[in-house]
Amino acid sequence: HHVTQPRQHTDPAVETEFKSMLTDCGFTIIEGDEKDWTREGVEVVVTGEAFSEAATKIGNIVSCSGRVEVKVVNRKDNHLLLATRTTSRAADLSEQIAAKSALQKAAHALGLQVLEYFDKQTSGATTAPAH
């Protein structure tokens, strides 16, 4: 959601970017609830939160910052596999477009981290447990 909005709303920019990246890399996205996930054999759930806010305005150009936080959880044992976050900025003539672009850029950066994590897991690389 965008912080300067009088009423907060859900913005699909981050979810859309993640779905696009994951499906482009061959992952199957199962939407629904726990029952659907169990029926389809979902092993890992990716969730997160995001927000954007206006940063500055110079002439007709407005910039916004977007913050995205993501976690990847193994459904079998509820172990946290990955937790990451980033902030990104974008500028546009439209505040809403700048905000969505900032969120999309941040989501893309985190999507790459999630894909790298999955790649390491499937290639046999070991990951040290978090302490």
Image (spheres, grey):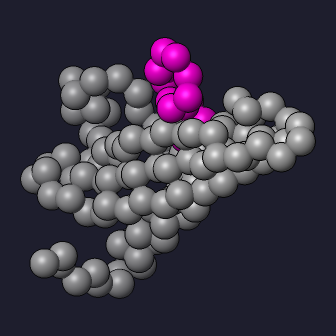
Q: Residue at x 83, y 46 (%)?
A: 58
Is residue 123 shown above or below 112?
A: below
Q: Choose top left, top right, bottom left or bottom right for residue 114.
A: bottom left
Is residue 53 shown above or below 78?
A: above
Q: Position of residue 11 (x, y in %)?
A: 55, 28
Q: Which residues are magenta?
A: 1-14
| Most foreground residue, 117 or 39 | 117
Left or right: residue 58 compared with residue 83: right
Q: Position of residue 41 (x, y in %)?
A: 27, 39
Left or right: residue 19 compared with residue 8: right
Number of numbered discs overlaid on the protein picture: 0
User: Is residue 19 in view from this perspective?
Assistant: no
Magenta span contains residue 74: no
Q: Residue at x 38, y 52 (%)?
A: 70
Q: Position of residue 127 (x, y in %)?
A: 28, 81
Q: Residue furthest right?
A: 59
Q: Residue at x 47, y 21 (%)?
A: 8
Left or right: residue 129 compared with residue 114: left
